[in-house]
Image: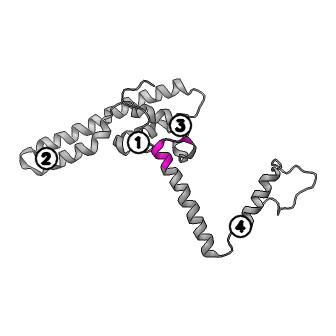
Amino acid sequence: MLEDQTRDPQAPKGRPTPKRSDAQQQRRKVANTPTDRKAAARQAREARRVDLAKRREALANGDERHLPAAHQGPVRKFTRDYVDSRYRVAEFFLPMAVVILIGSLMPAVQTLSLFLWVLVIVLILIDSVITGFALRRQLAKRFPDQNTKRAVTYGLMRTLQMRRMRLPKPQVQRGAKL
């Protein structure tokens, strides 16, 4: 801790003085820590469970305060909304893959299913390139002073997930103007 280190008495301490109520609360918290190893592990497990429940709830509701760091901020929120506001080819990949796989098991349509595989992959690539350029342009226009690094990758990875499976849950309807 900082209090245990020796320092020059004339040097500033590098942090503001805590309010008395905060200091007392902190002392009580330290006093209530369990000395038993099992009790400490139980208390840590409970704290971790509560934190994970808050994060899970935030992912379901889009609550910015408790979202994991990878999903926080106005740039990430706009990226999510931009991706969720339109249909994307990549979000239908899994259902299409199932249909194509079933078709590939039938000898009569094996060539057609191979053609569909190539078509789906090309469509996903084209849609991803168009979405990436458009998203990059919108981010530069709306957030000129903020760091938009990796936001396009974040958005493209979100397009690969089916809309119902996306976390944080979509907050905008399809066709919504941003």
Q: Where is residue 65 shown, x and y percent of the image? A: 58, 43
Disc ID at residue 103 = 2
Mark nearer the N terminus (1 vs 4): 4
Disc ID at residue 157 = 1
Q: Residues within 10 Å of mark 4 (few under 14, many from 20)?
A: few
Which element carries disc 2, helix, strand or loop? helix
Q: Main secondary structure of the magenta part?
A: helix
Q: CA distance from mark 4 to mark 3?
A: 43 Å
Instruction: Work out which quarter of the rendered image holds the N terminus and state it.
Output: bottom right
* Foreground: disc 2 or disc 3: 2
Q: How is the image coloured?
A: one colour
Q: Which residue is mark 4?
A: 32
Q: Residue at x 56, y 38 (%)?
A: 73
Left or right of residue 22: residue 144: left
Q: CA distance from mark 2 to mark 3?
A: 41 Å
Residue type highlighted by circle 2? Gly
